[in-house]
Amino acid sequence: MPALTTTSDGFLLHGEPFRIISGAMHYFRVHPGQWADRLRKARLMGLNTVETYVPWNLHQPEPDGELVLDGILDLPRYLELAHAEGLRVLLRPGPYICAEWDGGGLPTWLTADPDVRLRSADPRFTGAVDRYLDQLVPPLLPYMAAFGGPVIAVQVENEYGAYGDDSEYLDHLARSLRTRGVEELLFTCDQPDPGHLKRGSLPGVLATGTFGSRITDQLARLREHRSEGPLMCTEFWIGWFDHWGEPHHVRDAADAAADLDRLLAAGASVNIYMFHGGTNFGFTNGANHDHTYAPTVTSYDYDAPLTEGGDPGPKYHAFREVIARHAPVPDEAAPAPAVTLPPLTVHLDRRAPLLSQAAALAEPVRTDDPATMAELGQRNGYVLYRTTVPVAGDGLLHFPDGVGDRAQVFVDGAPVGVLERERHDEALTVRVPHAGATLDVLVENMGGVNYGPRIGTPKGLLGPATFDGTRLRGWDCHPLPLDDPGVLDRLPFTESGTAAELGPVFHRGTFEVGTPADTFLKLPGWTKGQAWINGFHLGRYWNRGPQRTLYVPAPVLRPGANDLVLLELHATARPLAQLTDAPDLGPEKP
């Protein structure tokens, strides 16, 4: 029997009235060394529950591989820490999570198959889901409330009503959880549009809503859909995420707190999205594609109550006051801001050019026409494509099928232009100085679409290429496995000079730390690329903004010498980086 049950207008936990006051905190966006700190701060704000998605694509990167459950993916440990803090857990295992996460959490090896109908009763899809659940559920069962653990409810699917209309698929997911031993309350969530709720819910499964305003109207729509049962907002949007090139999104704390008060005054349960957003470390950010492709930035601060660096912000204090009107709040002082590292400058005095060192990172795959990233077995990051141009002269270099997502073009090592999916670029005019000149195309996967029908859109060069109508054949395709922590050690770094360095170039430097503490990497004068500290992949930087700093968690640092590596794709005037004591997420959206 589930520990959490429903009444005509609320919840019972072990037979006693219980209101869920939850906040979203995704373990995979927070360094595991900081999970306990963030969970404690959740309890101190007055939360009795935390919510997390589960990213299938990280836990099962290979179709037949073992489930990854260590490091930042050690979900059992996260659940243990939540339990130790006295917090309940809402678990949202997918298979689709959206979450502004690469591919919405669906694995590339699955989305790359054009014959699979995603998020449907297609047995090729449900079979893959079942094999995933076969590995995921058993290690999580001890953490279910039925066995004394913290997990009180499990989500069946995520905003499915905005995507499809396949009740057989939803029923399959619910049965798949039940037959594997999940006894806890099951729920769905959808935007409270009548059509979405109808398509996305199941009989006997709690239907909840996702919204951030117009509280009275949204709760009324939920009640129209289900005449009785608990009212719950599973994603109460109190901030928003950013795309590259946009202003930084914020929401007034008093406005968000007033809406939270309205929710709680109506007797509803709530999950604040997000309580603590964290960071899209590495290559994990997603993208949207409405009229055009729009990738999400590295920071997932979300203007949440707890900032990206784990400090209480204005919403933390405002929400704590609101919650105290409706439920007990711990009689302890609100947490103070964390100590940060004193500012310092890092000189990156060693270099390794990417174009000449690509073979040191991975052996090339020889193809007649360029292969996509998926065809090369590359999940994310970069691929370097190399061929020769048989004729000289000025001409049009054309990729009629486009690029996914951003391509830098070089002739004999000299940069000649950039093509971007965002701008729908397909061609550029180049000068080929002699027959047999080397053409290099470095393609960057800027993040998989996480919402809508374009999930699984291919990455890399997406078809044949021509120069002045002549098809270019015979390509060396170099996958660049930069998500492998040890790959940077294979590069032969040499001392760099004082002149400006044209990219793509890996730059390396060291800096000394006394006592490790949080810090923020600032890169004035740098253009675009990736950053690593001590092999930990902080993520993507880009002077397009809005964000101007990358968060560096204290556990990434060590006393003594520390190592900073940047892959700069274009150029920097001076090979200097700064570690600063405050984040800069860019100009705010008016």
Image: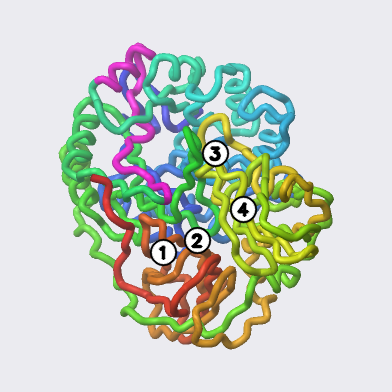
Cα–Cα gap, marks 2 and 1: 8 Å
For this view, does 275 lie left or right of residue 385?
left
Q: Is residue 579 left or right of residue 384?
A: left
Rounded to the nearest angstrom, the CA distance separating label 1 from label 4 is 35 Å
134 lies left or right of 285: right
Separation of residues labelled 3 and 2 (CA atoms): 24 Å
Mark 2 / mark 1, whichever is N-terminal: 2
Dots 4, 3 in contact, CB < 8 A: no
Magenta span contains residue 235: yes
Question: What's the magenta region?
Answer: 217-244
Q: Amino acid at mark 1?
A: Leu
Circle 4 is placed at which residue position?
429
Q: Secondary structure at mark 2?
A: strand
| In front of the other: 284 or 121 | 284
Q: Which mark is residue 550?
A: 1
**SS under mark 3:** loop
Mark 1 or 4, closer to the camera: 4
- Give the residue number, with chain letter if any, for mark 3: 93
Mark 2 lies on residue: 539
Above or below — where is 176 with respect to 458? above
For marks 3 and 1 on the same chain, the one whose residue lies earlier in the sequence: 3
- First in sequence, mark 4 or 3: give its number: 3
> Please, what is the three-letter code of the amino acid marked with disc 3?
Pro
- Between 7 and 250, which is closer to the camera in this rendering? 250
Q: Position of residue 354 (x, y in %)?
A: 65, 70
**Position in image of residue 150 (x %, y %):** 45, 44
Q: Which residue is painted at 21% across and 58% down in the image? A: 334
* Amino acid type, mark 4: Thr
